[in-house]
Amino acid sequence: MLGNDSKYLIIMRHANAIKHNPAISDFERDLTEQGITQASLSANFLANNPHVIPQLIISSNAKRALHTAEIVADKLNLPYNIIVIKDTLYSGDLNAYIDTIYQVDEEISKLMILGHNPSISMLSYLLTNNEVNKMKTASMLGIEIINNKWLNFDLKPKKTLFFFSPE
């Protein structure tokens, strides 16, 4: 049973994207067919665990991340307006991710943050005491934060709820 005085964080890396190509900017790279399937599988995993379905999805503004967020929301029958785009997650370092989470409204108890490596893997590594150190495409890490505030969530006691990778 999930605790009432806890916050729930799902850390997700975007799904598989088209390869780097000089004809298209990195920012504009979209998902491959495999990536669309991966994002759907990850969303299905969440659908089977309704206690951790996010109330808010904060996504990088890169096309591949936003497309992943839209697939997750669609598969979970969530309105697209729960997706908040955060530009700093595209090229941001670990601190950009942590600062973004610190600023989440306290009324939100279930949050998904969706972005890119290496920062997503670094965040996972930090929050799991080195248990999870590599986030593959469309993988998700679910963490319970034993605290009712997002501010300083990284310093509070935590429990890993799940690690899912669609590969």
Image (tube, rainbow, N blue to C red):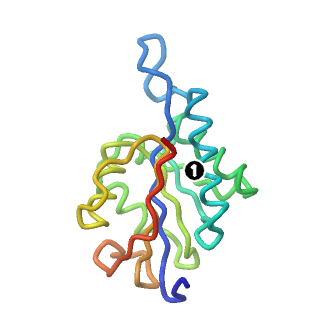
Front-most of residues 112 and 137: 137
Query: In the rendering, at what x and y percent does residue 24 appear?
Result: 48, 16
Position of residue 77 relative to residue 35, above or below, is below
Q: Residue at x 56, y 40 (%)?
A: 38
Position of residue 154 relative to residue 135, above or below, is below
Q: Residue at x 65, y 45 (%)?
A: 70
58 with respect to 160 (left or right): right
User: What count of labels does the image hold?
Assistant: 1
Q: Residue at x 29, y 57 (%)?
A: 95
View extreme (left): residue: 130
Query: In the rendering, at what x and y percent does residue 5 appear?
Result: 49, 88
- Which residue is denoted by mark 1 in the rendering? 42
> Which type of secondary structure does the marked residue at label 1 adopt?
helix
Residue type at tag 1: Ser
Query: In the rendering, at what x and y percent does residue 133 appear?
Result: 28, 53
Front-most of residues 153 and 51: 51
